[in-house]
Amino acid sequence: MSAAPVPPAAAPPPPAPGVCAICEVPLGPNDRRCPECGLRQTLGPGRPNPFAGTVLWTLIGALAVLWVVVLLVVLAAR
Ligand SMILES: [Zn+2]
């Protein structure tokens, strides 16, 4: 019985996807687009979340503006 001397924490970060998610063409570590189909490689393990920070608040603001415009139209139609 030999316990492996592996520390329980500090798992290595998942590698960036090595192939395109659609056409499975091998990608370089700095390829942000697939050279074959042009898919942006922004999703997946090891990639930043595209819906965080400024983009998220821009979407929330756009929805709030749309809600106000619809509210004004509905109030004006009464
Ligand atoms: Zn591709």
Image (tube, helix red, strand yellow):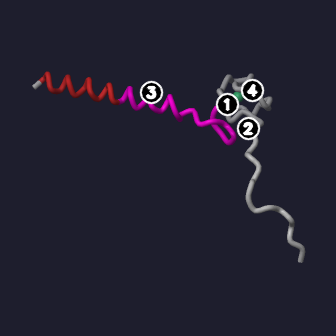
- Identify the amino acid type marked 1: Gln
**Distance from label 1 to label 4 (Cα)?**
8 Å
Instruction: Give whichever of discs 1 and 4 has the lower sequence position.
Output: 4
| Residue at 36% from the left image edge and 29% from the top image edge | 63
The residue segment tinted magenta is 42-63
Residue corresponding to mark 1? 41
CB atoms at circles 1 and 4 under 8 Å apart? yes
Q: For mark 4, what is the residue? A: 31
Instruction: Assign a secondary structure to mark 3.
Output: helix
**Residue labelled with disc 3:** 58
Q: Give the camera-side residue of 18 and 22.
A: 18
Q: Amino acid at mark 3?
A: Thr
Amino acid type of the residue tagged 2 in the rendering: Pro
Marks 4 and 2 sit apart, C-alpha to C-alpha, by: 10 Å
Q: Farthest residue in the bottom direction?
A: 1
- Badge number at residue 19: none
Give the class, few, some or many, for how many residues have Cα within 10 Å of label 1's Cα (few <14, many ≥20): some
Q: Residue at x 73, y 38 (%)?
A: 17
Q: Which circle, 3 or 1, is nearer the viewer?
A: 3
Spatial CA distance of label 3 from label 4 is 27 Å
Assess disc 3: are there few (<14), some (14-19) or many (≥20) residues with their C-alpha within 10 Å of its C-alpha: few
